[in-house]
Image (cartoon, grey):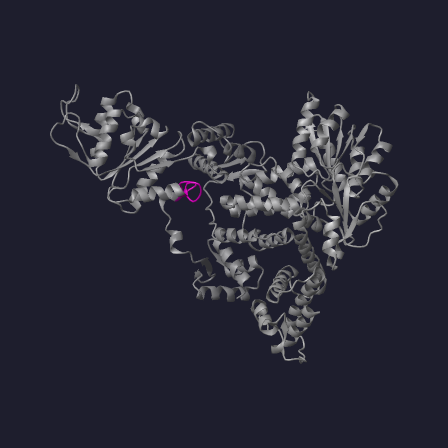
Amino acid sequence: MRQETREHLLNLLAEENALTTQEIADSISLSRSATSLYLNELLEQNEIQKSGTKPVYWTINKPKYENDEDVFVQYIGSNGSAKKAIETCKAAVLYPPLGLPLLLHGASGVGKSFLAYLIFKYLQENKCKGSQKYFVFNCADYANNPELLSSILFGHTKGAFTGAEKEKSGLLAQADNGVLFLDEVHRLSHENQEKLFQFMDTGKFRPIGEEAEMVYSNVRLLFATTEKPEEVLLETFYRRISVVINLPAFHERPIFERIELVKYLFEREAKRIKKNIVISNEVFFDLTAQKLPGNIGSLSNQVRMDCADALRLAPTSPTLYIGKDKKAAIEITYPPISKSKAGNRQLFAKKLSSLLEMTNFTELKEKLQDFDSRFLENMVVLANDSLSLKIKTSVQEQNRRIIDNEALTADSVEVVCRLLRIVKEKMDGKKLEEKMHLFSKQYPRTLLLSANLTKNLPLEVQPFVTFFLGVMLIGKVSEDIRYQALLVAHGNATASSIQAVANKMCGDYVFDAINMPLTSSARDIVTKVSDWLSERDTSEGVIMLVDMGSLTHLYKSLKPQILGELLVINNLTTSYALDIGQRLINGNLFYEIAKTAEREFVTNVQYFEGFAVEKNVIIASISGRNIAKKIKTICEKYFNPDIKLIVLNYGELANTLERASSEEDYLKETALILTTSYLDNTTPVPSINLIDVLDEDAENQLNRRLRNLIHPNNIPLLMNEFIHFFSKEGLSEKLEFLNPDVIIRQVEDVVDKCEKRFNLQLNAKMKFNLMMHLALMIERTILGAKDYPVPEDVNELKINNKPFYQNAQTIFYTLEQFYRIKISTWELYILYEILLG
């Protein structure tokens, strides 16, 4: 059986209660006969079971523990934020003989009483000693009368006090062989706390008025308080409470649990009034964000009042409507529809987690699309999911404001919502942060758009949605737009409305926008723009179109924060934005855009002359901008941090050099030009063809040209990285099936071992040639290259008085094991000739 078909079948059956063979065949797009063969094979492996005759129904075989759920599943969050707390509760109450005293701590309405009751039911479920009955007492009810409270707890004898006309047993006696839950225990007087901890020590107590005999009782004690226990309880009493469980406030619970709690409260009301309830997602989601002093208790009252208002308006309707939007809504049905099990959610989450190890984000996008279409698209339903509705609504609203192209994000955001439903809060935040940082280096503009689209989402899910939406948008946002562009205007939506039109007409994410209140001062504007700049790479340059304030003030205030050039145009119109946007899309140089604006726009323009205002190195490659970017990444590790590295297209470099030859000091801050081919350079700026690093005198040349730009000790390291890079690029064209990334690391290791074993010092060109030769040799051997006789006795061959053949066999052993090959004697002899030559 194909593994993916097997997984698909098991995933399908995990989501559904029971399916016929034909239903399964239709779902996985296979013939009925083929599906039947797969199902019978799974039946033999005891993975599934069948029932019925005509038709036969198939169900998944669930492990025993999946059906043995304990009562704590009723506590929302039992497998999430409260999982550890509940495990602690179980351990405490099961401890012999009668469990450990346990205190539940949390604000009013967080669910302390409910959890205490579930602890009692858990004890009953496990047939534990001391779980026959359950008593609840709120100490606050009689806090102003400690004598009466003492009587209720410990009981009293006849005549113990005025009005004690007969003997009465207290709660401790009544709860013998049961559970006593004391709520608001901090309201006990110090005297009663002392009596209680004496009982906890001995299991005995003395009723009020009794002087001789002690009463023995087997009672399991549970306590609860809303106050800090260490501050309100007697130290001697508090010391005897072995376990304290802290329960969070509603707004502190994870968003997934808050949504589930709100849904549960509406389901309870639907059952009470026996009607369907449809809640607009805006109303529903607002409830999940409430910060109420009474927590879930207050939230329950609010939900009930919403239902009461809806019932008042439509008393005879079978369905109540809460909120205005009936399309983006959550439907609560009565009678309730049985919830499908998330059978393989953990398996899916594990698969998704493994995908996060990938650093090739284009490949990650393809894997995620495949993962979604194979496993999630037909199994994860988003229609009645509040968080998914919120995400889709919010992202598309932002889309209309920024680029006005909802089709761009529609499918992508659906995929992200399904991924989030699977992963929920199990996402590794630190790993996600690392991936986001790496993604920002490779796809900065795509990530910026994604961050803008998700800016109004709840903070708990924002990083997840931002990263995965960014990955899904790869290829849909141009990364070749080099300059940051911003529109700033007075009014609630003036700048953003022009932004949406300009981005839509340009067909890409070009502009950001800041809307400023009409009362904003120049200082307010500078502060807002400064915040915007802090989140962006300004090394290439920034273009601003504004409609207010002193242009010179803006320029002087913001320029120090910008690494590259700054162009400020003091007139914001749709036509100007479209003109600038189109030039950015076309890849026009900053200088060209600035001069055009000065010449053609009827407005004031402020532009800082010169190619760059700080010391810089230009990097360009005739092979394309991507190669130049990779070279820049290598250089960033070794060049002094105060050197700005500027990537240009080869055509842009030619235009820049042409202008520099006629305009004095245009490149006065440029220290060096790095290229990958011969350059017709008539300017005073020195240039290096990086292919020359393979020449014998390369290190001396680099030492001369890179003086004051890089530490001398780093030059050999830089050369090795260039050799690695150019070897990989060259091999990509020559290898038929080996992965250049993998083989290049392997042959680097071989070259390094050859140098050490035979006391050789190979120059850069020799290393490059040797690495190319070895990589192609491995592929030849895998493909079964022809062997030839060796003209000498290989056992006699030596390099620097060291036996060649025996050492070579040792050097290549790991590679041979990895590829399951045997390198021929002929190939080793060729290597010997190369090393000697």
- Furthest toward the top, the residue is 162
Magenta stretch, residue numbers = 73-83
Image quarter of the C terminus: bottom right
- Left or right, 418 with reference to 270: right
Which image quadrant for residue 466? top right
Q: Position of residue 560 (x, y in %)?
A: 71, 31
In the foreground, 153 or 94: 94
Location of residue 792 (image quadrant): bottom right
Residue toward you, 392 or 607: 607
Tell me the quarter of the picture where residue 271 sits. Answer: top left
Residue at horizontal 72%, vertical 51%?
703
Relative side of 241 to 29, left or right = left
Q: Position of residue 457 (x, y in %)?
A: 58, 36
The answer to whether residue 80 is magenta is: yes
Residue 233 within the magenta-colored segment of the rendering = no
Q: Nearer the viewer, residue 183 or 823?
A: 823
> Can I make out residue 783 in this image?
no
Q: Is residue 290 in view?
A: yes
Residue lying furthest right = 662
Most extreme residue toward the left is: 212
Up/down of 688 relative to 211, above or below: below
